[in-house]
Amino acid sequence: MIEALGFEFFRSALLSGLMASVICGIIGSYIYVRHMISIAGGISHAAFGGIGLGYLLGIDPLVGAFWFTLGIAALIWGLVERAKEHIDTLIGAFWAGGMAFGILCLSLTPGYTPDLFSYLFGNILLVAPEHLTMIALLAVSIVLLFCILYPVLQALAFDTEYATISNLPTRSLHLVVLSLIAISVVVLIQVVGIILVIALLTLPAAIARPCSGTLKGMMVRATLISMILTTSGIFLSWIFDIPSGSTIILLGVAVYLLVLGGGGIVRGFRKDLQNTD
């Protein structure tokens, strides 16, 4: 296991996993508290349309996914805020429409698309240097943004009506959050792929929630949990020669179930004590 650290691609994978964990911890916690998991799922699957478009246009598929997903996020924001369209209908439309558009673009693309599997399920061991830079820039930007706007974003997360009455720029902030979700999805595609990205965004936050009293504390704990999951998953995938993205997610699911089961046991024990009294 130690010899793996001698390879540059392995060190890059660990570094990208740690930086992606910062994104997951902060954005994932906000998504979890705001109950925006379904929106993030719709945006993540719509990103497949951008990947297909990138192949069709002959550009980097992640570049295509970046702009396409940003456009989808802006469109969702506009339809929800201005047209007052029902959010569940929009999510279903963009979820299915994005995937269908990607398949159509790929079918029209001449030649073979060998990297398609990695975009669907991720391969953190193949993170390119330019993508590593993109992950680092996004992680730093998210940390700075949430440090500056934390009081406002906290108010928006827990009480949207109060934030609106207080004349806070809720509509603009909602667009910013949707854009950050879209960009985070594109960055995390390389780590766990489109199919599993929503799990990486939500599982660390779900694990951290029971032991967190504040949103800030939840973000810190979710970041640390995500770092442990990604690092452990990368090492296990190296040892057993199995897909890294799936390994990371399965570890997260296992830990979440343990936390959920442990919480149930504690609650049951307390109930038994109360009944005894």
Image (cartoon, helix red, strand yellow):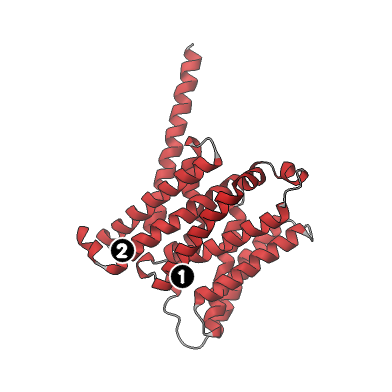
Instruction: Name the residue located 47 percent from the left edge and 67 percent from the top edge.
Output: 134
Marks 2, 1: nearer the viewer? 2
Above or below residue 58? Residue 61 is above
Residue where numbered disc 1 is placed: 119
Instruction: Name the residue located 44 percent from the left edge and 58 percent from the top edge.
Output: 20
Looking at the rendered structure, the kind of residue marked 1 is: Tyr
Instruction: Name the residue located 46 percent from the left edge and 70 percent from the top edge.
Output: 119
Secondary structure category for the residue under label 1: helix
Q: CA distance from mark 2 to mark 1?
A: 21 Å
In the image: residue 93, left or right of residue 183: right
Residue 253 seen in the current view? no
| Relative image position of residue 227 (x, y in whole percent) | 39, 51
Residue where numbered disc 2 is placed: 11
Q: Quick one: quadrant of the N terminus?
A: bottom left
In the image: residue 118, left or right of residue 62: left
Extreme residue toward the bottom, this view = 110
